[in-house]
Image: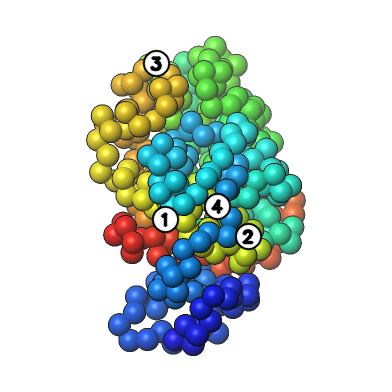
Amino acid sequence: MRRGRAVGKLASVSSRFRTPSSTPRLPTGSVDRRTLLTGGALVALAVPSLRAQARLEKPRIAIAVGDKSAFYFLPLTIAERLGYFRAAGLDVVISDYGSGTLALQSLVGGTADVGSGAFRHTISLQSRGQFFRAFAMQGRAPQVVTGVSVRALPGYRGPADLRGRRIGITEPGSATHLAVAMLLARGGLRLDDATVVGVGTGAAAREALRSGEIEAICNVDPVITQLEQKGDLRVVSDTRTQKGTREMFGGPMPAGCLYASDDFLQKHPRTAQALADAMVHALKWLQTAGPGDLLNTVPEAYLQGDRALYLASFQKVREAISPDGLVEEEGARTAVRALTSFGFDPALRSAKIDPSRLYTNEFALRAKQKFQA
């Protein structure tokens, strides 16, 4: 293959991330060509060449995450706790900002090298002329659930009944905010037809619904599962499953991911590969992990003193976890359509987003082959 003679050199951004129309033919017997080019990203460095250059360009990596204890980021925790980052030659420092927005700011500001956050951030950044790509997916569904208070809305019939109601979300601009906007639209309502309140993802969110401070909630597990178990909540929209995700968004919706700037991926391809290897290894582990495996691996604090609740919540979100770290092309298009139609950022409404520049599958594909995920 033409690029095979370039051992020891890094390809340019334009050659590493080119569109399928400009890609040379792959040799007979190689991995399926269409799969390799998913997301408009060519596998620019031949696998033997990559393995021959074992030394990482940047072995110490800072990762910014919004709420590390959430199931949304469970693969990141598994990769850390089971030593998969170390096995890949990385010294990873994970900073938990407790907010996706703050984690994003850390990444863009240069405090972090890589973000562990929502795929939608790549869309928002591209609308501002900043090109970041997801390169290892953690979630293939958003895991957000909307429900109504059984006490406040016992006769709920549909989204139109949310007019004038107070709806709790995790934080403004989040996936929960988007899900509420889309649900309201089903009932012919706009966001300002209801009152949206940020309630976080912990005990405060549960108490806000139970106390009547809010009458509906869009949140994540374990908050949702606990409210369900206590009989406080009636679920009306659920993206913990692929079926529910398609019903809400009209297609697959990529969620949590590792993402970094094009500049980082071009300058540190072996480091990016090591990160993808660790994440895909963790994803494979999660596909077969039993209850005891999970409880023995995550920090005790994640269990919040209720192991049964944690395991019940995990079973609810298990289908949403990516099996192999790959981004679906259809998923990227779905995300663009959702964000530009229901986004909260005015820049997104008129932005021309190129879905193929939101992600690359080249690193996850190699990791998938390595670990047979």
Which residue is tagged 2?
264
Number of other residues with Cα within 10 Å of mark 3, as a class: few under 14, some 14 to 19, many 20 or more? few
Tell which tag, 3 or 4, sits nearer the viewer. 4
Q: Amino acid at mark 3?
A: Gly
Please state the horizontal and vertical placement of residue 255, each as a whole percent of the image. Answer: 50, 48
Q: Residue at x 44, y 86 (%)?
A: 1
Of labels 1 and 3, earlier in sequence is 1
Q: Which circle's residue, 4 or 1, is located before the other in the chain? A: 4
Q: Residue at 31% across / 45% down in the picture?
A: 285
Alpha carbon separation for disc pair 1 and 2: 17 Å
**Is any atom of residue 161 visible in this view?**
no
Position in image of residue 137 (x %, y %): 46, 53
Residue 118: x %, y % from top left? 55, 46
> Looking at the image, which is closer to me, 197 or 25?
25
- Residue pointed to by mark 4: 59
Disc 3/disc 4 C-alpha distance (Å): 36 Å
Task: Determine whether 209 is above or below 237 in the image.
Answer: above
Q: Which mark is residue 305?
A: 3
What residue is drawn where x is 45% and y is 21%?
301
Q: Residue at x 30, y 82 (%)?
A: 29
Q: Find the distance from the CA under tag 2 to the CA under tag 3.
A: 40 Å
Q: Is residue 101 above or below residue 166?
A: below
Tag 2's secondary structure?
helix
Q: Is label 1 in a helix, a strand or a loop?
A: helix
Q: Residues within 10 Å of mark 2 (few under 14, many from 20)?
A: some
